[in-house]
Amino acid sequence: MRRSACACALILVFLTSCSNTTTEAPPPAKAQPLRPMKQAFGSVDGKPVDLYTLTSAKGMEARIMTYGGIVVSLKTPDRTGTMADVALGFDSLDGYLTTHPYFGALIGRYGNRIAKGRFKLNGTEYKLATNNGPNALHGGRKGFDKAVWTGRALPEANGLELTYISRDGEEGYPGTLTTTVTYTVTGEDELRIDYAATTDKDTVVNLTNHTYFNLKGQGEGDILAHQLAIDADRFTPVDSGLIPTGKRQAVEGTPFDFRKPVAIGARIGESDAQLKAGKGYDHNYVLNGAAGTLRKVAEVYEPSTGRVMEVSTTEPGVQFYTGNFLDGSNKGKGGKVYGQRAALCLETQHFPDSPNKPDFPSTMLKAGERMQSTTAYRFSAR
């Protein structure tokens, strides 16, 4: 009996201790990494075109297609968290197959203008297609913006790698150029673009992206109230054909001074010969800081939504363009009509017409060497 009583007591103590034991909660499940999503988007000349969606943890979304490496849409939140698409463009591939002003496109082999469509390299003169009056613009009649690139998702980096091989003689340029452009959406709501290229023959190359931004939202009026700052003490004035004269003019005392934030529309209508030449701003800025280093060079703020776009680059210049030639002929996403100054562009680059301007930073890429550069557009709200 005594042994039974003791045994019962021990069992009771054991059960009581078990009932008071706290069970630890399982560790929280790890957040799944964001990965690119791919979908079919049509075809061009029998080649399939894919659309990739890259999303940040904070909700920013970039949609990029393999035709032209085009940024089809770019959605970011305003100060209330409301999302809007801040990039001009079209709802379907068909829109991009019509005539349009390079909405969202990768630009090459040479971004911006080359005077009279010709240049000399190593003693040989090369003649290019002239598609902007007497000048060559943005790579010619069929530049990189009209090529179907080979796309490859980069799941671990939340990125998209695009590759295009431009054959020797394409649009008049020497050398077979292999170009790789990587788009990445970071956790800081940043669209980062890394450019790289190699060639088998000395050539010239100047790569950029031509996204048209309106921080109110695409199709929501003009960008004249956007406040802009550009870290540049000088710009390159142009002639009547928008070809740089070769000078580097100080911005101080001119409508081109954006060293401190200024509303884009504040001085755009002034009686200034350079503004008249471009029908507004359409000029290359000589950026401060060391080219080749990634540094912040510009910031845009839109007061009504609070959206902010910061631009960083390794390039020596940026083309500031205020959509002066948008004329309402392009109906964009949701049927929105894009009138004059419906968007702005900040195209990071080497200077226009550099192959004909020995004093400008060189755009020559030698055979066997590798060109690389980086530009990042970071979005926030305040």
Image (cartoon, rainbow, N blue to C red):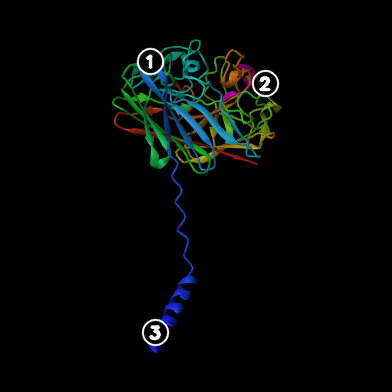
Front residue of 165/156: it is: 156
Q: Residues within 10 Å of mark 1 (few under 14, many from 20)?
A: some
Residue 159's x, y, as percent?
Answer: 42, 37
Q: Residues within 10 Å of mark 3 (few under 14, many from 20)?
A: few
In the image, residue 141 lies in the stretch drawn in magenta: no
Q: Nearer the viewer, mark 3 or mark 1?
A: 3
Q: How many marks?
A: 3
Q: Check the picture and name the quadrant holding the C terminus.
A: top right
In the image, residue 281 lies in the stretch drawn in magenta: yes
Mark 3 or 1, nearer chain start: 3
Answer yes or no: is residue 49 visible. yes
Q: Amino acid at mark 3?
A: Ser
Residue 204's x, y, as percent?
Answer: 38, 24
Residue at the image position 50 percent from the left and 10 percent from the top: 133
Residue at the image position 48 percent from the left and 17 percent from the top: 96
Q: Secondary structure at mark 1?
A: helix
Query: Which residue has dot 1 on it?
Result: 171
The magenta region covers: 274-284
